[in-house]
Amino acid sequence: MAKLFLFDVDKTLVDSCGAGSRAMTAAFVQLFGIDQGFAGIDFTGRTDTAIFRDAVAVHSLDGDFATLLARFQETYYSILPSTLAEVQAHVLPGVPEVLAGLEAAPGAFLGLATGNFRESTRLKLGRFGLYDLFLAGGYADDSEDRAELVAVAIERLAEASGGHEPREVCIIGDTPLDIAAAQANRARSVAVATGFFTVDELTAAGAGLVFPDFSSWQAVLDALLG
Ligand SMILES: [Mg+2]
């Protein structure tokens, strides 16, 4: 049976130490002359498109949303590499070993399901050589709604992996929104408490399996592949 593993990015694979939100804030200043454009807007587990839409509404920006979004993305991508370089961004414990183990497992395929845009995902993971490990992904470019982008990610990874049936789909993330998106797609949900939520909170949110982190990577691999 094919096993599709789709990973969230922020606080699941890497900790970019707020570089993403700092670059988004800087892009907002550069484009619209507004300081702290995202103050009070929740980022955790949400898509960057939805976060930007909230900021556009809060500041009553005029103009076609798609045009505003395209300008924002272009500016954000130009700023993000330097904000990433300024912080101690790092890969989370055990992640390289878990990804290598899954990549080597027969019938297992790796994908991404993230609220980041595709290009910011490439920038955040590429600096650690992780981006090219993933065959396909679903991104904030695909939908503002996490469950919908997870559906897109599953479809793309299934196709990229050769369309094997039957298949088991596993969504791996650090927030209750990752868990809800897995449930909406009738996928197995695995959570890791390396973000803002504890093991207990993620368990209460309905995750099928929860790890404090991936440092015991052999046990994580056994659980994922078992
Ligand atoms: Mg996350």
Image: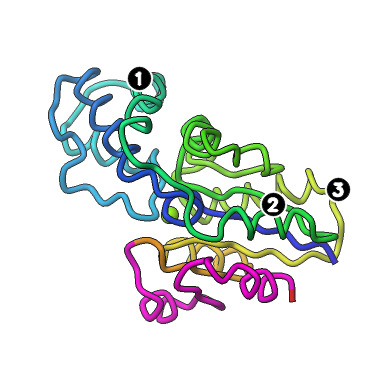
In this rendering, is residue 218 above or below 171? Answer: below
Q: Nearer the viewer, residue 95 or 39?
A: 95
Q: Which amino acid does label 1 sit on?
A: Thr
Label 1 crowd (10 A; few <14 / some 14-19 / many >=20): some
Q: How far apart are marks 3 and 2 (CA)?
A: 13 Å
Please state if 7 lies on the left or on the right of 23 as rendered.
right
Residue 93 image offset from top left, x and y in percent: 49, 59
Question: Which residue is rendered at x = 42% and y = 76% of the image?
Answer: 205
Q: Earlier in the sequence, mark 3 or mark 2?
A: 2
Q: What residue type is labelled 2?
A: Leu
Q: What residue type is labelled 3?
A: Gly
Element at label 3: loop
Say which quadrant the N terminus sits in.
Answer: bottom right
Residue 200 image offset from top left, x and y in percent: 38, 81
Question: Which residue is rendered at x = 35% and y = 25% of the image?
Answer: 82
Q: Dividing the picture into quarters, in which one does residue 30 lie?
A: top left
> Residue 217 in magenta?
yes
Say which quadrant the C terminus sits in.
Answer: bottom right
Residue 75, numbered circle: 1
Element at label 2: strand
Label 3 crowd (10 A; few <14 / some 14-19 / many >=20): few
Q: How far apart are marks 3 and 1 (CA)?
A: 36 Å
In this rendering, is residue 41 above or below 126? Answer: below
Query: Magenta span covers which residues?
Result: 196-225
Residue at which label 3 appears: 162
Element at label 1: helix
Image marks 3 and 1: residues in contact by CB distance under 8 Å: no
Residue at which label 2 appears: 110
> Residue 47 in magenta?
no
Nearer the observer, disc 3 or disc 2? Answer: 2
Residue 192, numbered circle: none
